[in-house]
Amino acid sequence: MTSVADSIATDPVVTERKQRPTWGRIGTYVAGFAIGIWILAPIYFLFSMAFTTQEEVRSYPKGVWPFIPFSTDTMRFFLEADGVLSGLFNSVAVAVITLVLSTAIAAPAGYAISRYLFPGRDIFRLGILAVRAFPIVVLSIPLAVLFIRTGMFDSVFSLALMHTALALPTSILIIASVFASVPYELEEAGQVFGASSWQSFRHIVLPLVIPGIAASSVFTFVLSWNEVFAASILTLENRTLPALLLNQLSQSSDAYQFAGGFFLMVPSLIFMFFIRKYLFNMWGQVSK
Amino acid sequence: MRITLLMADITRQKRKRNFTPYMLIAPAILFLAAFFAYPMVQGLILAVYDDEANLPILDEASLAADQVAKLPQGTSVDILGQQGNTIEGEITNDLLTEQWFRVTATDPSGETLDGWAPETRIRIRSEAEDGTPLTGTVRAVLGADADPLTSLRAEPSERAEVVGQVEARETVDITGVAVLEVWFNVRAVDAGGSSVEGWAPSRFIRAFSSGEEGRVDRGTDGEFTTRFISKMVDDRFFGPAWRTTLLLMAIILPLQFMLALVMALVIHARIKATSMFLYVFSLPMGMSDLAVGILFFSIFTGNGLLNSILEGLGLIDDPKLFLSADTRNWIIAAIVLAELWRATSIVMVIVVSGLQAIPDETLEAAELFGASYWQRVRYIMLPLLKPSLQVALILRTILAFQVFAVVIALGGGEIVTVLANETYRQYFFLRDNNVASAYALFILLLSLGSSFFYLRTVRSQGELAKS
């Protein structure tokens, strides 16, 4: 499937509908901006709360347009709080391990289901789709029991194993759709001109799929970074940032929560920017 | 000739490829089997299988002894006596133990004896630097009918052969120490109503402070039971949890699909700002529910954005408490808004990719025949979007059953509670894996049930044609 965002981004003028009456386009813009404000305003407010003084966070009223003095006070307070730095470190570690593991496992599987017709392929695909229907709450508790029994409880690595299991089905389907978007004829053409199958994969396919696989890895990273439920069940001392925040929620100040919320959001903001071209590759394909 | 060669080449290539795809998907299958299928099955078993249901009672204080009866977990028992036994199984900190000392002593006739005596009969007099006892004296036994002599035994066990007896206050050399697990001699009424008596390791029995009575803490024999499920159903949070979960879904899903459709139509209109709109609209997709919970907490909290705006506009004089125990409906409203904010993007993306699949010609033809924009949406796009909407509906419903951190962040998890939150509470605060698993099982059944329901009811012609 062609990437929709791609075509939109490259030549918007050509694809634009010319017959559409102007008032219709104005309506579209109005709706777009209204929804845009609905999405951006809360983010702006939280970020302004994360970068201000603690007094300002406590103050009331803040005015219709929160007039916020910029300060790193809240942020410093949060970063100096107990467990936050190690929580950040754990979160990064879990997310990176998850990213590496799930990409390493999903890439070959994705390649296989997009390039080969083999008996069992449809069952595999269906199985993977079905796996996504199982709620993670069912997984966490038996895994916790298993990890306690085997002495793997409360470790960054075992949490990453769990996150990999969560990310794997989607990763496989995304990577499969990325490979499927590179025509097999290209690979064949390479072989016709004398390249071995590895060479034509290495020099023709790989450069074309690297961005898509990177997007899938980013998706994995964000999934692991965001995951709260399993993280709070499978860790105790080595809490990741979301698990730590969730645990501190009832006994922490607003400033602490807002700064924590900021940290949870930053990766997703950055990564959404990088993967937005692949959104439809990822979810459009996955949902079919 | 050349053609047949080519054919042979192709078939050889095909045969060569046969195993490659299986090798490529093998790691994924193995990983999913270990960390998805296995825990899934385990989780379901936890909900209906009690592996600590019954405690076997033995006729002697030894694991090799014959079984006399089984006592269900929680049975009250009379503790008649205790005895040390070699520790079998894992050693835990709270294990009830007794020590036996290997001593050399002189008996009344002057003969030197080498044997074992329990810690109750030996008083330690001197110890080495590391705490190892070196010498001791035999304790005096009080009571009129007590045996004034202390027996030394061949093994550290009450059942072992007596090698000799020593008098009280005799000095002994301690040459060895054995740590034994205490076994209780218990008498109880079993499930059948008959009185039984026998031995069981003390680790399975919680003795009350009197030391003469206790309760079966856990057993070693499992059985299938509906106990956990009925415990879940009787839980005071169960009713509110499933009702709130379904209420939230009933409110959120229709609003969400309408909003997603509007967003998708804005994207699909292919105006100049589309790629910017697409980025902004899809921003919430990558955000965790906890972050979004905190985000909406910052808006609805007492000195938050909403109160500030309302006061700035002169609508209220004092900040209104939205997220308190008396404002349950406001908390639900906040959760609805947070979920709308967070999870609509994914529906939008699915709907947009569904819209892309509709041929432009179809819409242009409709336009040519005078269909208004609304008519095109209603009679052409929506029917053709059915498969996409079905997928989005299934995905969203499954995710809606797992709403968790938003609820905790906005309502603390007590005033408004949902099923996933109860799973967490049972596991984390009440330490009850089985009831937590029963909740998880319930969520799983609801997810599967609703997916099945959607698949059956929202089936469309287009989908049938495609498949």
Image: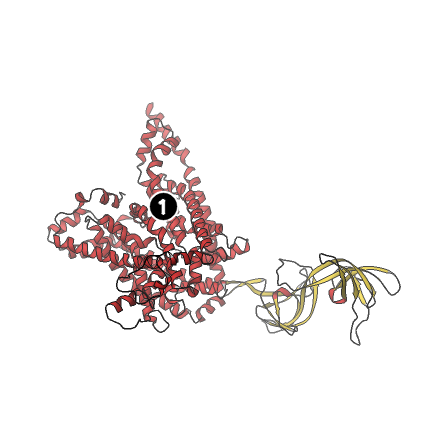
- Residue A134: x %, y % from top left: 40, 56
- Residue A56: x %, y % from top left: 34, 63
Task: Tell me, yes or no, if residue B275 can be seen here.
Answer: yes
The residue lying toward the viewer, choosing from A159 and A82, is A82
Above or below, B370 against B209 in this view is above
Task: Tell me, yes or no, if residue B400 can be seen here.
Answer: no
Residue B63 image-quadrant placement: bottom right
Above or below, A91 against B160 in this view is above
Residue occupying image coordinates x 11% and y 50% = B368
- Residue B28: x %, y % from top left: 43, 45
B212 with respect to B262 (left or right): right
Q: Residue furthest right?
A: B109
Dot 1: within a 10 Å radius of its alpha carbon, few (fewer than 14), some, or many (20 or more) residues? many
- Residue B416: x %, y % from top left: 37, 68
The N terminus of chain B appears in which quarter of the rendering?
top left
Q: Chain of mark 1?
A: A
The residue indicated by pointer 1 is A216
Above or below, A153 against B141 in this view is above
